[in-house]
Amino acid sequence: MQASLNRYLVVGALCTTISAVAQADNGFEATVGVGLALLQSHVKGEGNEAELFPMVELSYADFSLSPDGLGYTYELTPLSALFFSLSTRDASFDSSNTKLSNLNKRDDAGEFGIAWVQTSPSMELTTYLISDISDTHKGYEIGVDLGLPTTFAGGYLTPSIGVSYLSEDLVNYYYGVSQSEVTGSIGSYESDGSFGANVGLEYVYKIYSGWHSYTAVSMEYLGSGISDSSIVDRDTVWSGVIGIVYEF
């Protein structure tokens, strides 16, 4: 798996975009479905991925649970909130990667995140900080994402843009190469951190009653701090998702 491409992030985006979620008297909400993710690889020896995955989010009161982790929302005003999360970051390459067999295994990391979310009928602005709490990479990621939702062809269309910074410790753990790991085709590498950017487009369409379709495509610029690594093939990656969910 690749650390920068988390297929489960689309679930949160989907649940945010759907505006008319049915809520039971006890505060329980659920979105359940299946999606197909297409992910372009950026690490040597890692193939592009095409796989089915569950699009599931369960929430009760201010708590939410999805395959990506646990979340808690604290409302500041009707149009802004703080979101706290416990989640994981995938390792940059699998231990079965034969091209990187001389590198030490990189582990998935447990992370704590806090985001400030501001919404309006025409804007969704998210500022976030994600930090390692598992003593794995010992680093952090900060970023800002801006979405501009609008109605289109009977559904909700949201173009988005974002910028991020991955700390030196995070980048070096997942993409650095020590002298002891050097081979004929893999040189040593140490980064000072990496500034990245992304653009995306997502579309949610209500099919019937509680059924919705979800389509998204995004392009991510990894930043030179990552792309200059000797284990990285490219500086830009594409991803796409199509799925169908039912909300109740």
Image: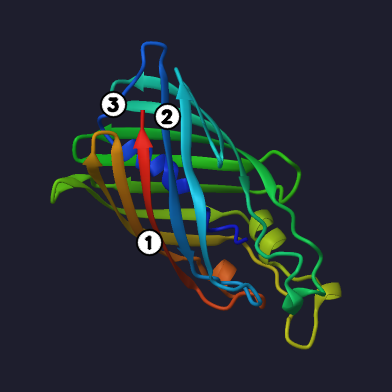
Please state the horizontal and vertical placement of residue 61, each as a whole percent of the image. 44, 17
| Residue 188 visible in the current orientation | no
Residue 161 pos. (x, y %): 33, 55
**What amino acid is labelled 1 in the image?**
Ser
Colour approach in the figure: rainbow
Give, as a three-letter code, the residue at label 3.
Leu
Query: Is residue 244 among what the camera can see?
Result: yes
Q: In the rendered image, which residue does mark 2 sit on?
A: 30
Upstream in the sequence, badge 1 or badge 2?
A: 2
Tag 3: Cα neighbours inside 10 Å, few (<14), some, or many (≥20)? few
| Badge 2: residue crowd in 10 Å (few <14, some 14–19, many ≥20) | many
Nearer-N-terminus badge (3/2): 2
According to the image, label 3 marks what residue? 79
Number of other residues with Cα within 10 Å of mark 1, as a class: few under 14, some 14 to 19, many 20 or more: some
Q: Does residue 84 lie above or below 171 as drawn? A: above
Mark 3–mark 2 CB contact (< 8 Å): no
Number of the front mark, 1 or 2: 2
Q: Considering depth in this image, is 46 or 132 the residue closer to the camera?
A: 46
The residue labelled by disc 1 is 218
What residue is rendered at 73% in x and 81% in y? 186
The location of residue 110, given as percent across then percent down, is 67, 42
The label shown at residue 242 is: none
Which quarter of the picture shows residue 159? bottom left
Q: CA distance from mark 3 to mark 2?
A: 22 Å
Q: Residue at the spot x=73%, y=72% of the render?
A: 97
Q: Is residue 183 left or right of residue 228?
A: right
